Amino acid sequence: MKKIEAIIRPHLLESVKDALQTLGVQGMTVSEIKGFGRQKGHTEVYRGSEYKVEFVPKIKVECVIDEEIVERAVDAVVKSARTGKFGDGKIFVLPVEEAIRIRTGEHGENAV
């Protein structure tokens, strides 16, 4: 099993979710986060005053999937989240040693 963590633009969440569900991903966790990278934030004007927004709002999508569909899942996220501009986000793929469903005690892929 692998865990995919994708940091994406907030307005692209629905298209990423739909793309992953099309592949058979049954569950995911979504978090509202803030951060910066090469984008380095931006300047905004509010009531005539300028201020710098250093941490840009993003969405973090996490899902644990079977290793057989990892490449297709990564491709699906890239295709649905890419705008071609700075700040499109990142995808991290991590190994998952074990998963346990708390309600039933199931282990491994059955728990996911």
Image: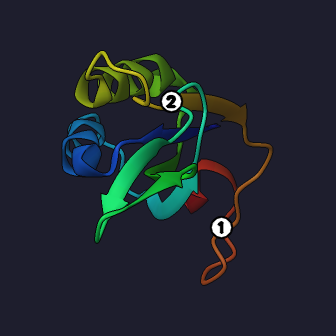
Query: Residue 18, position in %: x, y?
Result: 19, 44
Q: Total marks drawn?
A: 2
Mark 1 secondary-structure assignment:
loop
* Mark 2 or 1, nearer chain start: 2
Query: Residue 68, position in %: x, y?
Result: 50, 22
- Report the residue marked by disc 2: 39
Query: Residue 55, position in %: x, y?
Result: 56, 52
Tag 2: amino acid = Gln
Q: Residue at x 65, y 67 (%)?
A: 106
Q: Residue 102 vs residue 34: left or right?
A: right
Mark 2 secondary-structure assignment:
loop
Q: Residue at x 57, y 27 (%)?
A: 67
Q: Residue 56 vs residue 24: left or right?
A: right
Quarter of the image for residue 105 reads bottom right
Q: Quadrant of the C terminus?
A: bottom right
Q: Residue at x 51, y 41 (%)?
A: 41
Q: How far is disc 2 from disc 1 in space, using C-alphas?
A: 42 Å
Q: Residue at x 56, y 38 (%)?
A: 4
